Structures are given as C-alpha cells and as structure tokens.
Amino acid sequence: MNHRRPILAALLAALFAGPWVSGPVVPVAGAELPARLSDADFWRIVDTFSEPDGFFRSDNLVSNEETFQFVIPTLASTVVPGGVYVGVGPDQNFTYIAAVRPRLAFIMDIRRGNLHLHLMYKALFEQSADRAEFLSRLFSRARPDGLSRQSTPEALFEAFELVRPDRERFDRNVADLTAWLTRKRAFPLSGADLSGVIDVYSRFYAAGPYLRYSNSSMRGRRYPSYQDLQLTDDGRAVNRSYMASDAHFRFVKGLQERNLVIPIVGDFAGPKALRTVGAYLQQRGGIVTTYYTSNVEQYLFPDGAWPTFVENLSALPLDDTSTLIRSCFNNCSSTYRSWSLLDSIPALIADARAGRIRMYWDVLSRSR
C-alpha cells in the first residue's frame, strides 16, 4: 500500500475546490468546432500547424507511466464532456480521451515519429470493427476464436498470447495501411513519412503485446509493456483503458473516423504549433478542458523555455475546469517509478506570471 495516496488525494481535493480564473473566449460569429473534418482539412491542419521535426532521446512507442489511470476518477468528475483535449506521446492519450469524451483532440509531440505512430493507429482504428480485430491488425496475428465485443481485456490478451505473429499477414497489413492512408484518405504522405509509419508498425509486429518503452540511456530498467498498460487500473480496481471495453474503443474509433484526433509535430515551447491550435479554437469557441503533458515540463526548465510554454499555454481558450495532467518520475511515490498528477491550468498560468514557479520542483509541489 502506498502511504502517500491519502495525502495526495486530500491535496488534490483542496486544489480542485479553489476558484480558477481564465480569460474570455471570443469566437468568430457563426463558427464552431467541427463535427467532422474532411480528409483535405485534416491534412491541412496536420501540415500547416506543425513545426519542423525535433529530437527526443526515446522513440516513445509505448508509455512508461504506470499510474496514468490513477487521476481519471478525479479528472472525469472535473472535466465536462464536449471540450477539446490536447496531449503528447503515444496511445495513453486514447485512454484519457475515452475518459473525458472531448469533441476534438490534438496530439502534439516534438518528434515526427509520433505523427507516424498516430497515423498508424488512425488507420487501424478505422479498419477494425472491434478490439479483437484491432489487436489482430496491430500485432499481425490471426484473430483467436471466441472473442466478442463483450470480452474482457484479460480475455483478449490471454487469447492473443497463444497466437504467433504471421509474416504474410504483416505484409498484407502493410499494404492495407499504405492504401488506407494514401488512397482512401488521400493524405499526401512523403516517402519518409510512409517509411516512418511502416517502421513503427514493424516494431509492433516484432514485439507484439510485449513492446515496451525504450531509452538508450536507461537500458536494463523494466518498463511496462503495451499489454501491461492495457490491463492496469485506476488504483481503485477499475480498468479505464481504451481497450477495457467496447464502448471506450468505439468512442475513440468514432473520433478517428471523423478525423477529429489530429496529430501535430510541435515543441510545447515552440513558436507555432500550440499557438496555432489556440487561434483555431478561439475562432470556433472551443475550450481546452484537458491537457496531458507527461513530464515534458521537466525538459523546459534547463534551457529557459518554461516561460515561453506558459505564454503558449495562455494562448489556449480555457475555463475554470481546464485541467493539466502531468507525470512525476522517481520523486513522487515510494512505490511507483512514475506518479500522475493534476493541476489547474489557469492557476498554473497565474502562479507562473506572479513569479511563484522558478524550477521544475515548484511545478510538481503545487500539484502533489
């Protein structure tokens, strides 16, 4: 048992009880968030909102955050469905999206490889009728008999453990992925982008459900696998992952089919991506209700980029429920390597502008 959990719960309750302040949103008359985007509009946003490819030391195909579901009960009771979600990194975003039910989602990462990952996921969601077909395509393994939309995630992964990856199936799936993205969706992918999508897909074929986060400077650490992350829970024995139920899967699938999960290449403290998202939403009356940053803030302090991120964050339309999800590594739990935290975005901005945040620990301590 983690003795810090009751303390954390009390502090979070106090944090969310306070009033949050945000600036006014002034939408363009008659404009609103789209119910669906055309393929051309989707790619125009991906292309024109994005910044040049950046660098991070890991490929981040799978999360390394063990407790990412722990904040969902509080988050789901705080955030009103129908807003806008902003996140970073791989597929844990889908679990948060299933929890807060946004109308539109942007997934922004400094690496163009993350765009390739999410284009792969987009095609697989759209091609798959249910979770079993999705996993069959993701791992290039035949669908086991006996699985249905009512199958538990445990039953799904136990069944796929008994099936070997199939190279012929992988080759067919690569052709299907390529055709789906370049012909059905007609995205003008460059040769490098298409190669990136196929490379990501090959990693899931090779490792299957056991694919893990990698970091060349931290080899030897045991990170959770894709399967581990789909079978974890919220700390209260409830699995809230996007693979936990047909309803969760179908919600994310529906957004993908309507082109409403938009991957963008961008630095949180960059000059364009986040500010362009903010301007787009301001014009359409959209409110960012949830922003998942992982531990990106940690990397913004050493080079002095934190104040720029705060100003970029200020460009987003917010309300008094707008919530930031962040991850703390190695310092916030005696039981887990990572610990997920919540924070008020407007209060964070106010404290930063008042000079009360000078180092990364100030960010962590305010939300512990």
Image (cartoon, helix red, strand yellow):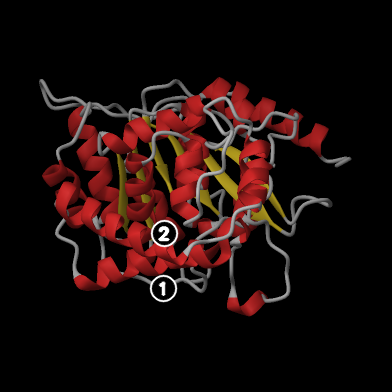
Residue 323 locus on image (x, y percent): 50, 34
Which residue carries the number 2 mark?
A: 169
Front residue (pair 203, 193)? 203
Q: State whether residue 267 appears in this view.
A: no
**Quadrant of the rendered image containing residue 182:** bottom left
Position of 315 compared to 211: left or right? left
In the image, what residue type sits under mark 2?
Answer: Arg
In the image, what residue occupies the spot 85% across and 42% down? 2
At 63% from the left and 36% from the top, the residue drawn is 153
The residue at the point 46 percent across, 53 percent down is: 138
Q: How many marks?
A: 2
Residue 336: x and y, percent?
77, 52
**Disc 1 residue type?**
Phe
> In the displayed structure, does residue 347 sit left or right of residue 235?
left
Q: Position of residue 119 (x, y in %)?
A: 32, 53
**Where 334 sits versus 94, above or below?**
below
* Residue identifier under label 1: 55
Q: Which is nearer the N-term, disc 2 or disc 1?
A: 1
Residue 24: x and y in percent read 29, 26
Q: Quadrant of residue 7?
A: top right
- Judge depth for marks 2 and 1 and give the one in front: 2
Residue 255 sits above or below residue 119 on the image: above
- Secondary structure, mark 1, is loop
